[in-house]
Image (cartoon, rainbow, N blue to C red):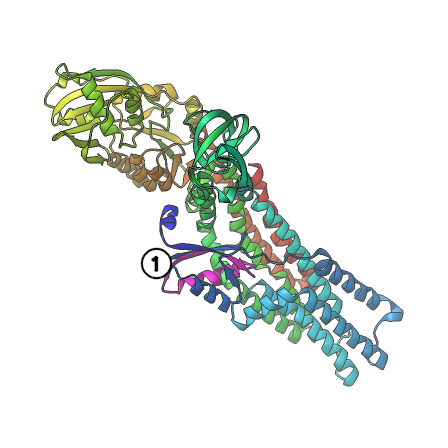
Amino acid sequence: MIDNHKLQQQESSEFNLSGVKCAGCVAKIQDCLLKVPDINYARVNLLDKTLLVEYKLHKNDQIVIDEISKLGFEASLEKITEKSINLWSSIVLPLVFGSLLMILGMLPNLMLNLQTSSGFLLGVLYAIMSLTVIISVGKHIITSGWLGLRTLNFNMHSLILLGVSSAWIYSSLVVVLSYLTNFQLIQHLYFESALIILGLINLGAYIEERAKHSTTEAIRGLMGLIPLQTTIIQNNQEVLIDSNLLRTDFIVKIRPGEQLPADGIIISGYGYLDESMLTGESLPILHSQDSSVIAGSINTSGSFLYRINQVGSNTVLAKIIQLVKNAQLTKPKLAKLADQVAKIFVPIILCIASISAGAWYFYASSNNVYHAIAIFMTVLLIACPCSVGLAIPVALMVGIGRGASRGILIQDASVLSYADKLDIIVLDKTGTITQGKPTVVNFEIADSESKEDILSILKSLEQYSEHHLARAIMNYAEHAKIVDVESFESITGFGIKGVIGNKKYAITSQAQAIKLAKTNTELLNDNSFSQVYLLREDIILARIEIMDPPKDDSPKAIDALYKRGIDVMMLTGDNYASAQECAKKVGITKIYATCTPSDKIAMIKQLQQQGKIVGFVGDGVNDAPSLVQANLGISMGGGTDIANQSAAIVLMKNSLSDVNYAIDLAKKINQNMRQNLFGAFIYNCCAVILATGILYPWWHILLNPVVASCVMSLSSITVIGNALRLRKV
């Protein structure tokens, strides 16, 4: 499993690649780089032709560029613009010229008689003209294919080069030998076939590139959310500048209909922001003074000024894009199978083509050389490793992109296969089932204590806490003064500790308070509210009761999980009465309360030992271990950074209903990957069997090389077309 947050912490570089055409190219690059001592990780994205490299100690970008160059590819830290396929010169020209030669060869008055001088000269002219067109329109195929053959790093172009060159060389030999010798060869020339094959291959590549462009639509949509220019306030004047020149602390003015170029905080005015491309939330959300706003949001109405606090790669939008890119590099189990197939595919096809050609040469009843060459070309041209290599990446690219556009961030595709097999979903309570906006509803203090002092202690300690309930206490103690805290410590599953004025204080749960308290135990109480206790040593100083109501969509979302046949369980650190009250409102029957993080992990392990596939949904710091332990960890986007980094899927909208959508999407991606991989594999196997002519003795089925090139292109286009269906999920 790839840990995306680890990738971000290591020294890494992203390269743009050129010349990478198929899964064989990808496998060669990755295998080569992993042999370099300084490189810890290397992964190629075939669709957007990028390479992510993680170094063990220090960056060494030049060695990566050099190693890739040795393989015949180009790598650069700068954007590489590959020459696109020209519709007229690369497709129309060879097809028209090849069709013209075919028509000429079929007309009785123009058929070549290679025994005559005029027929021989015309044949030589056909050879020269066809070779000129082949070199001009197939230069990239010839270069890439030859490098693959020379370095034994076979790729799709290696097969095409062998097929087309066989056609031209055989035809040229027929022209020369028929005129100069008595050696009898069937006078069938493949000059037109070589041209038509190249034209059809370029046509297939042209359609494939356009289809691939559609698969990256979601990512390009996210990248396009940043406006090119922005209005800033400088010396009390409005100034229009390029967005890439923005820096932190700049003041930006946003009018209705404008997009936000960076993250920041509103300092005056208000706006209704459409954040649907980032969170999936369909309705615009009101943001006013002191509200945090994120890059890429669209201001539907209102006008405001905001101060930038994050720009460039540090914005929420940039991190989302990077997470999605990283996720597309993760390897599901099916992808590993595809990689293994891709590595051996081309050598196997070369063997099959050679064996088939040999069999036809020795056993054909007539025209042995002609049939051997034809079969050799047909097998080479019909076998397309591209479709096998594209099967998984294209499904991931479209599916993960679709999820991102709906606020579902899939960070680790390697665990998506568990979505089909989930037996039970374990839910945290606070911030997951509930709104995560707790409020203090009751505050009890010991008789000997001052409310003002207690609130000051609570605020001073809680200011360092990331727990959801800390927000409620901070809001309640808003006007209390803050004092110095020494030796602050946050203990997962316990609470927080700190020293104030040489006295040790702790803020903890009811379960821990029962264990520790020896004085003022009358403050201990059991009710349906979440309870937090302030202790000085073993003395209870205060009890804070907090209410956090369930989200509006939680009952419906949980009912939908039950209807799927997935069991649901609640694990919470709250007291049993509070957990039971919440569970009753949302329809959960299995409850475990007063759980520490270790208790949650133990429960998940116990369920897994029973053979169950477990999903866990949480959002707090204390949920991070459980998110990692579960087969499928899902984090609510409004939670802590550590929870989001630990989860395989992050729900940006912070809605429990999106758990069902995430499961649906994961299932569809899995299904699509299986369809693509096994469909492409079966398709290629059947095509190769037909191409060998093994069925000819019974049904007289024998494919033409031109037909083979059409069938080859169709396989990749079919895989991409199937993946594009995920855009409608």
**How many labels sit on residues?**
1
Relative to 181, 40 lies left or right: left
Residue 631 in view here: no
Please tell me which residue lies in front, 270 or 366: 270
Residue 607 placement: quadrant: top left
Q: Residue at x 29, y 30 (%)?
A: 467
Q: Residue at x 65, y 76 (%)?
A: 362
The extreme left residue here reads 518
Relative to 409, 685 lies left or right: right
Residue 83 in view here: yes
- Relative to residue 685, is residue 664 depicted above or below? above
Residue 170 at x, y percent in the picture: 70, 75
Please tell me which residue lies in front, 586 or 360: 586
Q: Amino acid at mark 1?
A: Lys
Residue 651 at x, y percent in the picture: 43, 34
**Badge 1 is on which residue?**
56
- Relative to residue 496, is residue 147 depicted above or below? below
Residue 158 at x, y percent in the picture: 59, 67
Please give the range of residues in magenta: 16-44
As for residue 31 lying within the magenta part, the answer is: yes
The extreme right residue here reads 109
Q: Secondary structure at mark 1?
A: loop
Relative to 104, 260 lies left or right: left
As for residue 181 lying within the magenta part, the answer is: no
Give the quadrant of the C terminus.
top right
Q: Residue at x 52, y 37 (%)?
A: 405
Residue 206 placement: quadrant: bottom right
Callout 1 environment at 10 Å: few (<14), some (14 to 19), or many (20+)? some
Q: Residue at x 48, y 29 (%)?
A: 305
